[in-house]
Image (cartoon, helix red, strand yellow):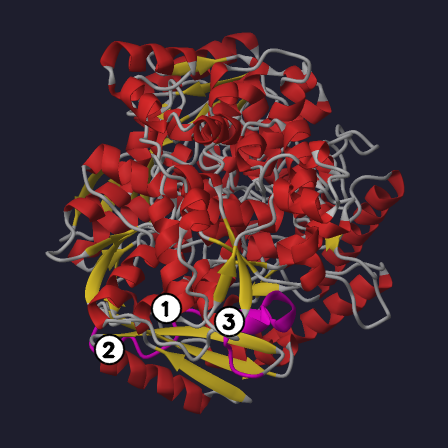
Amino acid sequence: MRGAVEFGTAARALHTMDASNYRRVPLGVVAPRDADDVAAALSVCRAHGVPVVARGGGTSIAGQATGTGVVLDFTRHMNRIVSLDPGARTAVVQPGVVLDRLQEAAAPHGLRFGPDPSTHSRCTLGGMIGNNACGSHSVAWGTTADNVRELSVLTARGAALTPGRDWRGAPEGLRSLVEGELALLRTGYPELPRRISGYALDALLPEKGADVARSLCGSEGTLGVLTEAVVDLVEAPRAHALAVLAYGDESAAAQAAAGLRPSRSPRSGEAGGWGGPLTLEGMAADLVPPSAGLPRGGAWLFVEVGGASAPEARAHAEAIVRAADATDSLVVTDPAAQRALWRLREDASGTATRIPADTSGTGAPGGTEAWPGWEDCAVLPARLGPYLRDFRRLLADHGLRGRPYGHFGDGCIHVRIDFDLLTDAGIARFRRFSEDIADLVVSHGGSLSGEHGDGQARAELLPKMYGPGLVALFERAKAVWDPDDLLNPGMLVRPARLDENLRFAVLPREPVEVAFGYPADGGDFSAAVRRCVGVAKCRTTTVSGTDVMCPSFRVTGEEEHSTRGRARLLHEMLAGEVVTEGWRSTEVRDALDLCLSCKGCRTDCPVGVDMATYKAEFLHHHYAGRRRPAAHYAMGWLPVWLRAVARTRTAPVVNALASAGPLAALGRRLGGIAPERGIPRLAEETFSRWWDGRTRTEADGGPRLVLWPDTFTEHLSPSVGKAAVRVLETAGLRPVLPPTARARSARDGGARPAARRGRVCCGLTYVSTGQLDRARTVLRRTLDLMEPVLEEGLPVVVLEPSCAAALRTDLPELLHDDPRAAALASGVFTFAEALEGLAPGWTPPAVDRPVVGQTHCHQHAVLGDSADRRLREAAGLTGELEGGCCGLAGDFGFVKGHFEVSRAVAEERLLPAVRSAPEGAVLLADGFSCRTQMEQLAGRRARHLAEVLAEGLEGTGR
């Protein structure tokens, strides 16, 4: 083969799971380059009797993308759009192409692929065909099967077929099998908009065109291996509007959705064809944060309509509102606002995995984990309201909780349920509920799966839906296509039991001893790792809006460099079956090496995986009692080295040495620093020394606050601190610096000077390098020094976003046993938050210039930038800052071996924005790393917001 063949520990560990509850350990992973490679792999596996599982984005929720044989990963090489014909409205695609890439290619022609699952930014066309995926626009454009024209497949025995209509591409024996069972095929399938369960053998009926390609959709890789597909494209409306309709509860919303279903499809796009709903999506209040800004109600329908123009789309939406019997409504036409609302819906598959505490007093007192397992059944839309009421009753009967949402217009419901999949009793209840809910769905004339397929989660229950005769016919059809049962065995026919191969069975039952507190996971590191349910938003290949996650994956495209991949390796490390060296694992270490610790996943991941914390935890254990990389000493202990330079006043000497070629190169080599990097210049006068020597101009009677002298402001960019003092004092505030050891010693009468020597520090550099024992020591000393501040309850303003984030999150999570940590964390303000909260009447100077730059990734993930946006707007700084990450990310971009990745991350959004900045634009970056990256890679100096405002004050005479 010319593609990748990987049978090592890391490759196997990365592919043990998809987005389901199931886990299987493969023998190896193959990434074919073309159909010939696929044929070669099938030949080898056939010769050795090894099963084959085709895999796309790995977002399957029923276990179809896991297997014990060879996994074919189509995302790495077979991911191209072969051709696109706007006239014929077709595209030829390889199975590994991500749906969003097809949408981007079709958009300039006014076209799109109709189905769009919520995982559209990372799911592949091959996976969509394998599961017959649908998405929110299925009321308009149907399922994937409705949009497939022709397929190219290889059978397990190596036959190359091109299935299409009129029996084209059928394997020998399929036609005779079908023609012998016409009566069963005509009566055995329920008529539903969403029927994904089982094989679609009814597509082979003569009155349905004997469509072999359509019959393969939803076969979950069990009949043939897809190598190429010809798909139909539909005309996209030029404008969209979103009608948000509020109802008292989800049953009322479901009943309304049935009445709003379009009477015809807008597929043709003729004039006036966009007036009907393109989507009919439902969500209840238990999945929507109060800050979402939805109209008042207990449940909502998201009804999207289109139009040839924005006014026409709005008119269609308003017509929907008039036709709907809603308690309240909202029409949204702004594209950004629509995207924000759709994100609520698309992230539900992740957010639904955490059910908050029941505050009614009748249920679980604490929050619980929730899982798929009964994820996406479907009934007739007219039956959805009654079904939901029965579903809620059945949940209560079993003592379970879940939050339904989904495709109300098609009668398809998604739900994550708080199954206990860790104990024998919980797993037994999981089985009983699954059997009872299958009976309930069938009693409503429904399908066990309405979108994600059966896999292992539901295939065992198919006889309840179809009866033994049709299930036996499924087995015969499988034997025609794959007589050796080589392709994805255990799915759909002769399935494994639904309570076997559960992925949590291998995890340790007792909590692992760790350094961080993991308060959101009950202090259990295993529970923290379990957060990753595999929805793979971290595998998105482009930055959307202000999102950050996951920069290293977007550069390398490798699963091990995604948040999900790293979580999978940690899961396998805890399991100890594939990754056997525990905390000493080199596979986990190498995967985490390119994690930038940007914390983007903490916010952008729908379930809040925090890989930066997990990385610090791992490094803490991995290097315990062992020599660390040189960079951990050079940059992890940066505050110590910089304070030593400041005490000895040798900054000019250090700067001279750092600019001397041979000496600088030697220093970089000894310190583990990338040879491509310049060493930032140290300030010859630190911020604290400037403070001590300045003439006080404190505002009389103004609120006092503590201005935190972080390492970067103190030693590398004191101009930021000076500017902040100027602005804060002009705003009527009285900044002071934190107590030092000298000041505290005097108060104590010199009783405890030795233990309190030094200055405050957030511990960031120690945390990011996993030196958590040292970080705890530094942070406890900081809390000792800050006791007078905590006693007074003074706000603490931190200018460096990464340091503010460390104090807000790392401090209380690392010193979870010290109440002072939470007290200090709650008192931390950013520069903009301080001005807004402590000087609400102050008006900033009118800078009135465009702004270009990047929101610090830690600010995005931990702190939020709402106050910054309002402050910039008040100062006339127009324009939006970029999302993503600068790529330097603290010490990451300075470490030897990281430079190319660091630069590639910067080239994604930041550097192009800097190069194309309009004349007179302000380059803005509050983070020292971001400013350094711009200076070193673009040759442009950026400034902190405090510096920009201070400069503006100069021009006003204030």
SS class of the residue under badge 3?
A: helix
- Residue neighbourhood size for the residue with mark 3, other residues' Cα within 10 Å, grouped as few (<14), some (14–19), many (≥20): few
Q: Indicate whether residue 799 is drawn in magenta.
A: no
Q: Nearer the viewer, residue 819 or 526?
A: 819
Location of mark 2 (residue) = 310
Direction from residue 201 to residue 397 in the image, left or right: right
Image quadrant where residue 474 sits: top right
Name the residue type under label 1: Leu
Q: Residue at x 47, y 85 (%)?
A: 329
Q: Let me know if residue 229 appears in the view.
A: no
Q: Distance between the Cα atoms at labels 1 and 2?
A: 31 Å
On screen, 535 above or below 877?
A: above
> Viewer-nearest of labels 1 and 2?
1
Location of mark 1 (residue) = 871
x, y percent for residue 855: 37, 52
Location of mark 3 (residue) = 837
* Region in magenta: 270-296
Q: Earlier in the sequence, mark 3 or mark 1?
A: 3
